[in-house]
Image (cartoon, coloured by chain):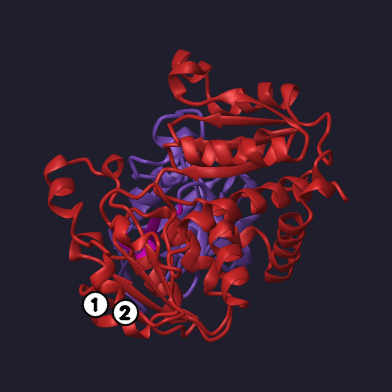
Chain colours: A purple, B red
Amino acid sequence: MLNVGKIEEGFVLDHIQAGMAMSIYHHLQLDKLDCTVAIIKNARSNKMEKKDILKVECDIDMLDLDVLGFIDHNITVNVIKNGEIVEKKKLHLPKQIRNVIYCKNPRCITSIEQELPHVFVLADPRKEIYRCKYCEEKFDRRNL
Amino acid sequence: MRHLMNPLDFSVEELDRLFDLANDIENNMPKYAHACAGKKLATCFYEPSTRTRLSFEAAMLNLGGSVLGFSDANSSSAAKGESVSDTIRIISCYADICAMRHPKEGAPMVAAEKSGIPVINAGDGGHQHPTQTLTDLLTIRTLRGHLDHLTIGLCGDLKFGRTVHSLINALSRYEGMRFIFISPDELRIPDYITEMLKEKDIPYEEVISLEEKMPELDILYMTRVQKERFFNEEDYIRLKDFYILDKKKMRWAPADMLVLHPLPRVNEISVDVDDDPRAVYFKQAQYGVYVRMALILTLLNIQV
């Protein structure tokens, strides 16, 4: 059993689907932060059999919960202060995401105007369907 | 400030007011002849469309206003690489209202986000064409007397036909509607439309044969298979004459069925149908001017 030490301040993302930690690491742009990050893959889990965990020592405000909610709203977000869990944040599918996924419709205005943000709006929360704000191209979040 | 990007931008009640105004314009043209004196409409057309552009221009001229603009991307600063956002900021300094057509979907929305004047989506790629929808709704409401409890057959290019998508969205808000989608397999209605209808519990059918369903229709909405929407010319040639409505087929239609078409038509409606009183597509073009006049007045907040 591998042991990774406690963090003093930051967040622990628990119950990440096994194999998804690196994808979340990139989506959250953790590679751009100058802080300690521990990526634990394939940890044993009673609930999930196997899971990934991310531990990040940084200011909690630096975490984009919308992006995280979009990637997987089943992840548990533990907020850590003074080495203790002070809050468990519940994630939701965000109503809108910006520059997380990109519109692939060749007829969309975003295909020719590079400076435009790629904005997707939650169109059907039950089916987890997002649509491009501009052309309404469909994106099924479950295919992420 | 309001824009028009999608027919659903206006509530059913707002549309009723708009159509009442359009009908008043139809019956009292001289009353509105100077309503927009001193106002300018910019028609920013990044792809050719004589009909829609002239309809907008006629609408503004009928209201006593002026028009300026461009009719294809090559004669605009887009040819020099200017973005839609920059163009609309400039146009906002020159005009009071803008009608924009663009081959890329969502371009008018990009413009609306940066604009200082109301922007009307005059068609964006295969996406939306709200003023055509307003025209269609006004035509049906005026000639049938109501917009609810109708069976509407939509025939032809239901995949790329933006007028069709906009019209279905708009009509789905009225009670008792039933849709019959008539198309070849390759040009079937997109899933997101049928999903929307299922969620609202609105009945629809997808069929290939036009004749089979004609007797059930209150409205037959014909569309052209548009060459510019195809990446592959072979597909276009194979599908362009899939449906041809002619005098013989009209025998299957109820006596009070209306035939609408956004125009221009190519071969999909034979000229021998033109004199049939049920063929209302030329009247529809006239209603297009009235509804655009009503829209300009509404977006500019001008009371007459």
Residue type indicated by callout 2: Met
Locate residue B183: give its quadrant. Answer: bottom left
Give the letter of the chain under mark 1.
B
Residue that numbered label 2 is attached to: B214
Magenta span contains residue A98:
no
Looking at the rendering, the stretch of residues picked out in magenta corresponds to A136-143
Which mark is on residue A38?
A: none
Residue B259 locus on image (x, y percent): 42, 67
Please report the residue visible at 67 percent of the width from the left and 21 percent of the height from the top.
B90
**Pick the front one: B261 or A96:** B261
Residue type indicated by callout 1: Glu
Please report the residue visible at 26 percent of the width from the left and 42 percent of the height from the top.
B227
Which mark is on residue B211?
A: 1
Q: From the viewer's perspective, tell me whether residue A32 is left or right of residue A80.
A: left
Residue B9 locus on image (x, y percent): 64, 58
Q: How many other residues sit within 10 Å of disc 2, few (<14), some (14-19) or many (≥20)? A: many
